[in-house]
Image (spheres, grey):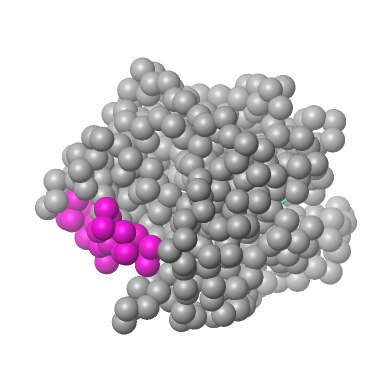
Amino acid sequence: MKVLVIGSGGREHAMAWKLSQSIKVSAIFIAPGNGGTYLNPKFKNIDLTDINLLSDFAIKEKIDLTVVGPELPLSKGIVDLFRFKNLNIFGPTQKAAQLESSKDFAKDFMYRHNIPTAKYRTFKMPDEAHQYIAEHGAPIVIKADGLASGKGVIVAMTVEEAHEAIDFMLVDNKFGDAGAKVVIEEFLEGEEASFMVVCDGKTILPLATSQDHKRLLDHDMGPNTGGMGAYSPAPIVTNEIYSKVMEEIISPTIYGMAKDGIPFTGFLYAGLMITKKGDVKTLEFNCRMGDPETQPILMRLKSDLFEMLYKAALGHLDSLEIEWDTRTALAVVLASAGYPESPRLNDEIHIEDRIIPDSYIFHAGTVYKDNKLLTSGGRVLAVTALGNSVKEAQFKAYEAINTVKFNGVQYRKDIGYRALNNN
Ligand code: AMP
Ligand code: GLY
């Protein structure tokens, strides 16, 4: 079977890596891929991002399954287009992807289906938004309605910051259409976790639990990023929390979408806030797997990822059971100088041949040019390792990092500390 993976990040490298372990898979194309996938003879990078050209490619190459990594092509309707052309693809339709591409859609959906989430109001007019902030005070959270490359959420600790965020989005239109509407919501306190499932429209297959570290610096300080590290499982998701998430969030979402006439196929990612009391609220939905959560999750997956996604795309997930490695996997992201504000590009990356057992280096912002591996984005590599405990996985991941060098590298030294505290 021939597979096409859409995307270029660490998540897509991990998907391709896992798909390549299936005996059913004969070829893997990645569009556009990165330096790491280019250098691996098992994969072929395809320099395409336009969804029409991708569908032409899938027809020409007789691709049996296309798997979509990031949200952007989903929000542009790649799944609708591929299905229209009778191509087999795994992911949500453009309408279903609104759970991620419109915060207003997601909040309205959660309210209608009684899915726990922060109280909110949606605004288009700056005056009304400013007045709401004046009435509610800080801390308060301002979110651009649309996709804003992970920069659309401002957790305002002061009223001034909140007013500034409103002006930024509604007056200065800094996010364009994505910020033409804003959701203002109640600030929630607790610990975050990521909960992902695979769904074929009817059957829900939960993936292993995980947690990521969004802040740039140790002890969860500094600016928010796409994620500086992650691990699986997340000890904070106890059996009790797990059942609550399935009953109160995941099941009502999947059944609610089906009831609303928008059946959800694809990966559904619920960003959770778990309070001290053990209540769980939904911070956000993503219609894709998380990055870097995918890297540790897929290192723990023992079952055949191709079979899982192929069956899900055909609506036959009910006949599948999956198996997980009981060990912990932990990923540390190596970011370029200047990340997240203005990542520096074109620093040469050196990776020693020495292999640390049970570890793998997934590439993200890398490119191979003139016989050199160079940085080409903010998050450059995710160094991931398996261990019998969080401590062991952490130790091996940091040992594997010693095999990598590039100028300006930034990474956190404490990935996994919450899991160690919760153990
Ligand atoms: P989101 O993209 O909606 O998940 O927001 C990005 C990050 O902002 C989350 O991972 C949280 O750290 C933070 N955040 C979002 N919504 C809230 C909220 N209502 N209360 C506190 N923090 C939030
Ligand atoms: N790591 C968070 C995300 O993928 O959205």
- In this view, the residue in front, 409 or 74, is 409
Left or right of 264: which side holds 283?
A: right
Residue 132 located left or right of residue 262? right
Residue in front for this viewpoint, 232 or 150: 232
Q: Residue furthest front?
A: 354
At a point 35% along the width and 73% down the height, the residue shown is 368
- Nearer-the-camera pick, 244 or 159: 244
Residue 122 x, y percent position in the rendering: 66, 51
Above or below, 271 relative to 216: above
- Where residue 342 sits: x, y (%)? 58, 78
Q: Residue at image x 20%, y 39%?
A: 1
Residue 44 magenta-drawn?
yes
Look at the image and say whether residue 80 sits in the magenta stretch.
no
Q: Position of residue 246 (x, y in %)?
A: 61, 25
The answer to whether residue 130 is visible is no
Q: Is residue 385 above or below residue 374?
A: above
Which residue is located at x 48 percent, y 52 percent? Answer: 360
The number of numbered discs placed on residues in the rendered structure image is 0
Q: Residue at x 18, y 56 (%)?
A: 57
* Image-quadrant location for residue 142: bottom right
Q: Taking 285 as reference, is 32 left or right? A: left
Look at the image and tell me whether residue 410 can be seen: yes
In the rendered image, residue 327, in percent from the top left (x then y), is placed at 58, 34
**Image quadrant containing the C terminus:** top right
Range of residues picked out in magenta = 31-58
Query: Quick one: 11 or 75, which is closer to the camera?
Result: 11
Residue farthest along the top direction in this orientation: 319
